[in-house]
Amino acid sequence: MKRNESRIKEAADLLSSRQRFLVTAHERPDGDAVGSILAMGHTLKGQRKDYVLYTQDEVPASLAFLPGVSDIVHELPDWEPGSFCLLVLDCNEIERVGKEGERALSMCESAVILDHHLGQGFCDSVSFPCVSVIDTQACATASLCFELFRDLGWPVTKEAATCIYTAVLTDTGGFRYSNTSVRTFELARELVLAGADPYDIALKCFESRPLSKLKLLGLALETLEVYYNGLLSIMIITPEMFELCGAREAETDDFVSYARSLDTVEVAALIKEAKPGVVSVSLRSKRFVNVAEVAGKFGGGGHFNAAGFRLTGNPNDVRDELIKVIGTYLGGKGS
């Protein structure tokens, strides 16, 4: 039995034996995080399990169409300590859940991690039953949820299929990124057969943008600069730009892809200061630069080709330091 299959079975055994679950994901949830949480919720509901779906931050408006999205809450339930199993999806560091992550972990009696980001998880640091399923080859965390449901023999409803398909579609950039494989398309087929509507989901994910987002994108593109003979591109968004457009930080989730789309670019960065002094950076690469390693130097993480970090400071200072660090990864290619 393969290592991941063994871990999936361990996770399945834990889920089948528990009745109450707190399902959560990383702060500033994206399509994979939201899709995975909701798919888990729909499936637990079908098994008559007790559950709460929690994220620290609001769901992006672009994902508001997903069935069950109104069930996601932003405060931890008032449960007795030791009365629930914690399901952490799309991240394996409890700190990434947000300010309530450590408290949730201290109150649960067991935990399951499902993730496809680099990392080891927190199971080694706890004394209660804990299973960590981390597969960096998976196209999305939602695909691991699907494997788990299949191992359990739990039906995937149309609603759950819609959420999983959305997670896969967004995390693969519409089946364009390097995490797309034969298995990705096989999974997509199974989800469509289960009721997911690929046209409707694509329309809502990629062609249903608010005017505020497009206005902000226009301002962001005006800041686009390239370095190292075009191998690095950077955009910056300031608090004033957010205010002028009436836009939210969640509306910038795909902006970095525009900087990445330049024909000469290997690494793209989007630097956002949604609140004064709080800087978020999204990194993307095309081929040879491990941006997860770059992000790690600033306290962040992610995938080889997609990563990010957040810190306090001045966005221009962050840009200058980022240019220096990325330059060491580009080597002589940008000279």
Image: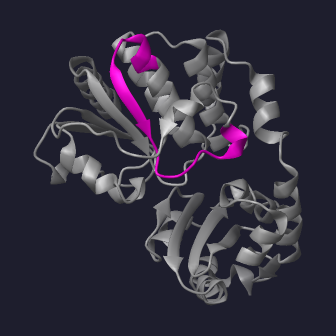
Give the total number of marks visible in the rendering.
Answer: 0
Q: Which of 20 and 94 is in front in this view?
A: 20
Residue positioned most to the left:
127
Position of 206 with respect to 194 (left or right) is right
The quarter of the picture where residue 279 lies is: bottom right
Question: Where are the magenta residues, as a range?
Answer: 43-63
Q: Nearer the viewer, residue 25 or 132?
A: 25
Q: Which corner quadrant holds the N terminus? A: top left
Instruction: Provide residue 2's location: percent of width, then percent of height.
Output: 32, 29
Instruction: Provide residue 39's location: percent of width, then percent of height.
Output: 51, 26
Residue 65 appears in view: yes
The quarter of the picture where residue 6 lies is: top left
Does the stretch in magenta take in 52?
yes
Which residue is at a point 78% across and 34% down the rendered structure image? 204
Q: Nearer the viewer, residue 288 or 299?
A: 299
Residue positioned most to the front:
78
Instruction: Provide residue 74's location: percent of width, then percent of height.
Output: 46, 46
Which residue is at a point 33% across and 22% down the rendered structure image? 50
Instruction: Provide residue 185's location: percent of width, then percent of height.
Output: 65, 26
Which residue is at a point 60% across and 70% down the rendered structure image? 281
**Is residue 280 depicted above or below 316 in this figure?**
above
Q: Which corner quadrant holds the C terminus? A: bottom right
Does the stretch in magenta take in 261?
no
Which residue is at a point 69% across and 69% down the rendered structure image? 270
Position of 196 with respect to 135 (left or right) is right
Residue 263 appears in view: no
Position of 210 with respect to 248 (left or right) is right
The quarter of the picture where residue 213 lies is: bottom right
